[in-house]
Image (cartoon, rainbow, N blue to C red):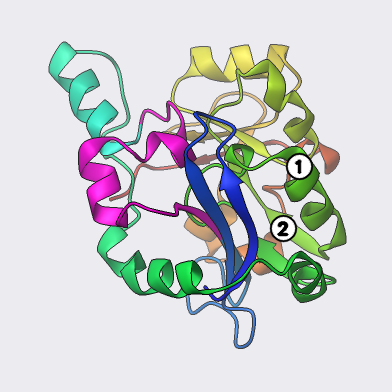
Amino acid sequence: MTVKAYEGPSTVNGDNIMLGIGCEVKGSRNTKTGPMVQVGTMLRDVHPVEAVNNGADEAICGGCPLRPTIHAEMKAEGTEVSEFPCYVKKYYKVAQWKALKAASVDYDNALDVLAGRSVRFREYGNLSSVPREVSEPLLKVTKNHTLYEHDWRNPENQWLALYAMASVHSIEEREEAHSMGWRTFRTGNSLESGEVFCPNYTHKIQCIDCNLCSGNSCGAKDIVNPPHK
């Protein structure tokens, strides 16, 4: 990630974070998403692996139950939680982190890079950790996008329901998110009424060709995907 769209306080706790854009030239080699541009957040002053281990990742991930520290606590307490914690391999992000730290913020370039492109937002971290005045214009210029939000209960994040799927982990959470106007992306092995399995899971359709995980603007059914490491 070498295009920096933001550096400044996290909306979660005020820690210094960065919003970066990657795969803007050749596109991602991710077999699930296809060659989408990738947008993610990282802490400015804390090594990605250290941030996960000491809980500093709260600044970009909030209270996400898949954060390794929270996931371990919930399992130890016997609280219902997804089978696996966050699948992002933070040690792969070290080179990105170093490159992004060295880059200067160039918001106009970030808008140009995303304009008319297929974009995977929240490649890492919650987009809601970045101020709305930064993130919403980026969302609006894309051709299409995917986006998931873990902090969907936060009153300050309700505007994101237009663009993002509420990431839920139970039927009860799905119903709660629905009552607040969100479509949902749920981890699970069976379907409830109004849900379909992720087309990549059932038919190997890549995200770049699917476009279902883009909030309530597309009016589609909710999405379910089996848990994965």
Q: Residue at x 71, y 36 (%)?
A: 221
Q: Which residue is disc 2 drawn over?
A: 145
Left or right of 69, for residue 56: right
Task: Kindly tell me whether residue 189 is visible in this rendering.
Answer: no
**Label 1 with label 2: CB-CB less than 8 Å:** yes
Snapshot quadrant of residue 34: bottom right
Rendered position, 159 above or below 87: above
Q: Nearer the viewer, residue 170 or 204?
A: 170
Q: Secondary structure at mark 1?
A: loop
Q: Which residue is disc 1 drawn over?
A: 163
Q: Which residues are magenta?
A: 40-65
Percent x, y of residue 124 = 47, 53
Amino acid type of the residue that numbered disc 2 sits on in the rendered structure: His
Examine the structure image and report whether residue 221 is included in the region drawn in magenta: no
Rendered position, 87 above or below 103: above
Q: Residue furthest bottom?
A: 26
